Amino acid sequence: MFNKVIMLGNLTRDIELRYLPSGTAVGSSGIATNRKFKSSSGEQKEEVCFIDITFFGRTAEVANQYLKKGSKVLIEGRLKLDSWSDQNGNKRNKHSITVDNMQMLDSRNDSSSYINPNQEQSYNQTNPTTAAQTQQQIHQQKNSIPEIDIDDDEIPF
C-alpha cells in the first residue's frame, strides 16, 4: 500500500520538543492550509484545514531551532489515524501526519538578523582602513553565531 501526504502551510503553534527514553527527539506542532473557491451561488468562500504533525530525530531538532508559529513549511510524510477514549469513555479519532521530510519556505530576511557565516561579504576596498574595519566586523559577526554540530546530509533544505 502507498501512504504519502504532501502539505504546504503555516505552523499553527511553536514546535513542542521532547525526548524519548531512547534519546530520540520528537517534535509536535500543527499545520494550517487553506483553499479559496466560489460556491454554487457565486459567493467567494475559504476552507481551512488544520492537522497535527509530528517530527522525529534530527528533523525535530532542526524544526524546533528554526521554525516558529506562522512559519511557512512544506512537509512530506505519512497519514496516521490516532484513536483514544476521552474522559467520558467516548471513542475519539483524529488524523495526523508523521513527517518524513520538510522544507522551510520562509525567506531568511524574515528571521531576526541571521547572517550566514559561509556567505561572502562584499565591501569597497578603496579605503584600506574602512576595508579593515569591515573585515573585522564580519569576523565579529561570524564569531557571534553559535556553532551547531550538523552534517550537511542532515540539513533538510
Image: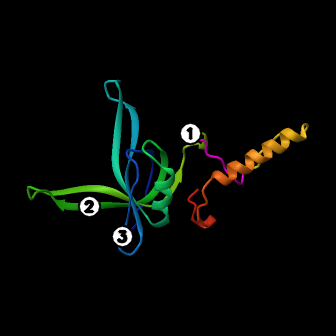
Query: Which of the marked residues, 3 or 2, is nearer the chain's N terminus?
Result: 3
Under circle 1, the secondary element is helix
Q: Residue furthest bottom?
A: 22
Q: Are marks 1 and 2 in contact (CB under 8 Å)?
A: no
Q: Residues within 10 Å of mark 3 (few under 14, many from 20)?
A: few
Query: Which of the marked residues, 1 or 2, is nearer the chain's N terminus?
Result: 2
Residue 55 visible somewhere in the drawing: yes
Under circle 3, the secondary element is loop
The numbered mark at residue 110 is 1
**Is 84 or 131 nearer to us in this picture?**
131
In the image, taking residue 142 as reference, residue 99 lies left or right, namely left
Q: Which residue is mark 2?
A: 82
Q: What residue range appears in magenta?
A: 111-119
Q: How would you classify the magenta stretch by its main secondary structure? A: loop
In the image, taking residue 45 as reference, residue 119 lies left or right, namely right
Which residue type does callout 3 highlight? Leu
Separation of marks 3 and 2 at Cα, in angstroms: 19 Å
Query: Residue at image x 56%, y 42%?
Result: 111
Q: Which residue is mark 3?
A: 20
The quarter of the image holding the C terminus is bottom right
Rendered image quadrant of residue 137: top right
